[in-house]
Image: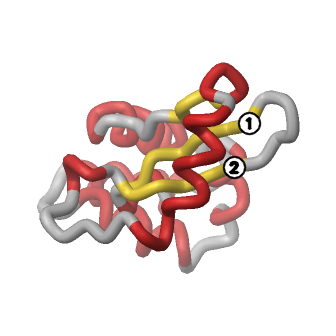
Amino acid sequence: MLECGFDCFWNTETNELIFLPNESQSSIYDEEPWKEDRKKIKKKPKSYKCIEGMTSSESFRIMEDFAEILLDNNTLKTKLFNALNNWKPFRHFKELIDFSDYRQNCFAL
């Protein structure tokens, strides 16, 4: 949700997560569907922590770190680094991981 332009708010008392569209990232914004969730946060603002998404450079570094730790599969490791060093690195990295046996491991990182 964070990558889709939403802000995430975590209620530290109940562990509830609330996702609200980030108004600055969207030119078309309708308040109505999120009205109740905004009220919850306004009513008890100290109970909620905002979880921010990663920057592109942070995401890229995580992908590099993951590729680096693949000690048992040099073929995939080479393909991942090639993907990261070429055009559309995020898309090509994701495609390689999605069709590999390492998909779950990537999420664990």
Disc 1 crowd, CA 10 A, few/some/many (<14, 14-19, 20+): some
Q: Secondary structure at mark 2?
A: strand
Q: Quadrant of residue 43?
A: top right
Q: Nearer the viewer, residue 83 or 22?
A: 22
Where is mark 2, residue-wise?
17
Across and down, in percent, residue 84 comes to 28, 51
Q: Earlier in the sequence, mark 1 or mark 2?
A: 1
Q: Is residue 61 depicted above or below 2 in this figure?
A: above
Q: Residue at x 33, y 51 (%)?
A: 22
Mark 1 to mark 2 CA distance (whole Å): 6 Å
Where is mark 1, residue-wise?
11
Left or right, 99 with respect to 46, comes to: left
Q: Nearer the viewer, residue 22 or 95?
A: 22
CB under 8 Å between callouts 1 and 2? yes
Across and down, in percent, residue 79 comes to 38, 61
Q: Residue at x 78, y 29 (%)?
A: 12
Q: Nearer the viewer, residue 104 or 74?
A: 104
Across and down, in percent, residue 74 comes to 52, 53
Q: Is residue 90 depicted above or below 100 in this figure?
A: above
Q: Residue at x 59, y 55 (%)?
A: 37
Which residue is at the far top? 46
Q: Identify which amino acid the numbered label 1 is placed on.
A: Asn
